[in-house]
Amino acid sequence: MSELPLASKPEGLNPGDVIGFADMPELMAFEDLLAPLVDPLSNAVLWQTRPKLSDLLRPPTFNGTIRDITLTAMDEPYERLLDAKDRGWTMPRPSGSFERTQLGFEQKVNRYLGFIFDAEAYSSGTGVKGRIAAELWYYPLPQLLKKAGSITVYTAVTKNGDVSTYTSVAKKDSYKTLKNRGEAIRRVVTKPRLDAERFLAAHDVACAIGFSVLRDAMRAVISTPMRD
């Protein structure tokens, strides 16, 4: 499993790569690097109006700090999006169907990006509460194909209230994005899980490793010949 520094370019991502972030602001800045990979023509201003990722990844019963974050790049993110519910994840509502069948999708499936999210849930009052787990995806919205020669009929109302119609013939094939609130990129985040048991297990392993290191160090001291 390779480690990628935050400064590296996202196009270097491979399945299994892990990117670490100290906190949510770093992760949300990383999202801005992902947007042009998903849709090179995405509107940066509209992208900034998306809901805060920290609100989507915060478990309902947790009000503390999300830190020590890792994202693990998925293998076959589109397929994992389709079977997320079967794997036990709760999807956002209304989720609908994530399967794409329209023309032109084959050219877009390679721009689906998916990540496994893992982070520490920390409370200033009680310390570490556990680990937060979730999955998230970024992908371009579907497009409709308008073929060359297709006719579109437009209707207009004049100032006098008269209704007029006119037609437009497409000169070449073109795609039109079905935009949602003006966005060309969709982000899907599963309902996060707060798992205290995972933290306790990790803590026990860390303590065992620490004890082992200490024990070995003490043995080394005892086995050293005494000197005047």
Image (cartoon, rainbow, N blue to C red):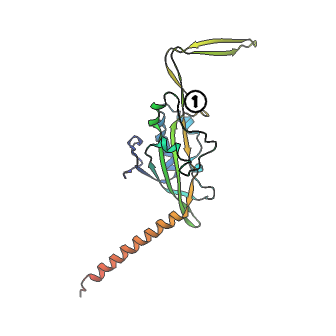
Q: Is residue 217 above or below residue 126?
A: below
Report the amino acid beneath label 1: Leu
- What is the quadrant of the C terminus in the image? bottom left
Q: Which residue is mark 1?
A: 178
Q: Residues within 10 Å of mark 1 (few under 14, many from 20)?
A: some
Q: Residue 20 in the image: state x and y as whole percent.
A: 44, 53
Q: Residue 105 in the image: state x and y as whole percent.
A: 49, 31
Q: Is residue 23 above or below residue 13?
A: below
Q: Is residue 2 above or below residue 49?
A: below
Residue 197 falls left or right of residue 15: right
Q: Residue 147 in the image: state x and y as whole percent.
A: 51, 19
| Residue 128 occupies quadrant | bottom right
Residue 82 falls left or right of residue 153: left
Look at 56% across and 46% down and name the residue there. 189
Element class at badge 1: loop
Q: Residue 164 in the image: state x and y as whole percent.
A: 69, 11
